[in-house]
Image (tube, coloured by chain):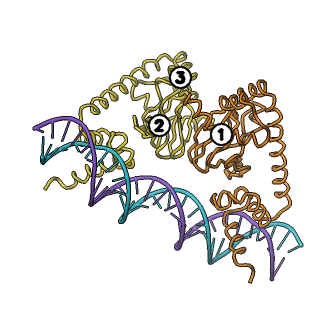
Chain colours: A orange, B yellow, C cyan, D purple
Amino acid sequence: MDKDRLLQTQAEPLLDHFQKMMPLSNTEKQLITDLFKPRLYRKRQYVLQEGDTCNQCNFVVRGCLRMYKLDTAGNIHIIQFASENWWIMDIGSFHGRTPSELNIDALEDTMVLQISHENLLSLYLQAPKFDRIFRVLMENSYVALQKRLLQNISANAEEKYLSFIQTYPHLTNRLPQTQIASFLGITPEFLSRLRNRQAKPKS
Amino acid sequence: MDKDRLLQTQAEPLLDHFQKMMPLSNTEKQLITDLFKPRLYRKRQYVLQEGDTCNQCNFVVRGCLRMYKLDTAGNIHIIQFASENWWIMDIGSFHGRTPSELNIDALEDTMVLQISHENLLSLYLQAPKFDRIFRVLMENSYVALQKRLLQNISANAEEKYLSFIQTYPHLTNRLPQTQIASFLGITPEFLSRLRNRQAKPKS
DNA sequence: ATCTACATCAATGTTATTTCTTGACGCAGT
DNA sequence: ACTGCGTCAAGAAATAACATTGATGTAGAT
């Protein structure tokens, strides 16, 4: 009884998240509570490592994760951040059941709710409503990704940065600039200079 | 050819370790080189997390790991440190194939050679000599553990600390005192006072 | 009742690590 | 030659981790 309440409480942010999209029955809530497991990752800890198959779909409750690709020279290129109420996983690896080329790790101590591939399939079977919910989530992600791509191929560093602080105001002062630079695809030094330029509107 | 040499080099400390106990044939060396994989853990990174089943048997090449238990109040109790040439794993979880109640994480950037449960079984089949080697290792560990238990139930804080610096002189100045205190089961503050007392032999 | 062996909490000092900024310089494209 | 970026190295600044100390408390031994 108490234990159920505790789990329910842990899953709360996720239930809220879903219910902003669509009302849930008690059975559905219970399913979510049962199938998503809370897990804590500490700063720098890997959630997914290149070469492993992504087997968990992660919803961030608090903290912040990043997903990145290591190039052959060892440089990291950040694909996505995920802070509160974001989803993160390697979708290709997760659904294709193939080894991932990406890494996910924690920029802060982070608590996620995660569901395994197996349990997600089981969720779809037991509650087809989630087919729809996850379809909508996918659409949103797709749009965000397309926007990011567009930015990336068309904008210069300053524009990218301005767009970043508009899109992710809550991350701008929360993350080290190194990370933001890596997300934007510029050097931290150059980002530092960009910001200075802004501070002093050209004299 | 080059690649083989490189792997051989990486496995070197482990081969040495075994050969101090018993000579190895080339076939056996090759087996070890093949079945033990090098892996780097960064400071604070988990090697094993409570709830997961321990699937790797780890030999520390350089760096330092710790194994600990979290109590219900969230205090950590360090069971074991493992620096160069030590083994670390949750033996119960590893052999029983059950979820672990323990955590293992890195106190320093640490390089290990690890063999999976599956590959260890395969090693025993292919080279029964390792049955004996690991039996001896187990015996040594058992003795060390028993000694630690004895210390723990019979000695006071000062005695425990003195015994620690005698048994692990190389760790005494290498690890933060917080960690040593947690290993000894006393508070860092009290350890600090103990050390001060020693410095000034009572006036 | 008091002494010893420890604990807890809070404040402060010390050291190490991480992050940011700046300067000097290079290079490719307008 | 100028603009938009990059690289490398050095230092400054911010933050986090660790150690020490004082005040105060408690349980058990004497």
What type is the residue that disc 1 sits on? Answer: Glu
**Chain containing the residue with disc 2:** B
Marks 3,1: beta carbons within 8 A: no
User: Which residue is at 73% across, 57% downward?
Assistant: A168
Spatial CA distance of label 3 from label 2 is 23 Å
Circle on res. B32: none
What type is the residue that disc 3 sits on? Answer: Thr
**B200 to C13, vertically: above or below:** above
Marks 3,2: beta carbons within 8 A: no
**Chain containing the residue with disc 1:** A
Say if residue B67 shows up in the picture. no
Q: Quadrant of the N terminus of chain A?
A: top right
- Which residue position is annotated with label 3? B98
Q: Quadrant of the C terminus of chain A?
A: bottom right
Q: Nearer the viewer, residue A169 or A193?
A: A169
Q: Position of residue B10 (x, y in %)?
A: 53, 38
Say if residue A30 shows up in the picture. yes
Q: Nearer the viewer, mark 3 or mark 1?
A: 1
Mark 2 residue element: strand
Number of other residues with Cα within 10 Å of mark 3, as a class: few under 14, some 14 to 19, many 20 or more: some
- Which residue position is annotated with label 1? A12
Spatial CA distance of label 1 from label 2 is 41 Å
Tell if the residue under mark 3 belongs to the same chain as the one under mark 1.
no
Q: Position of residue A109 (x, y in %)?
A: 57, 47
Circle on res. B60: 2
Q: Nearer the viewer, residue B21 or B148?
A: B148
Sequence-wise, the earlier of marks 3 and 2 is 2
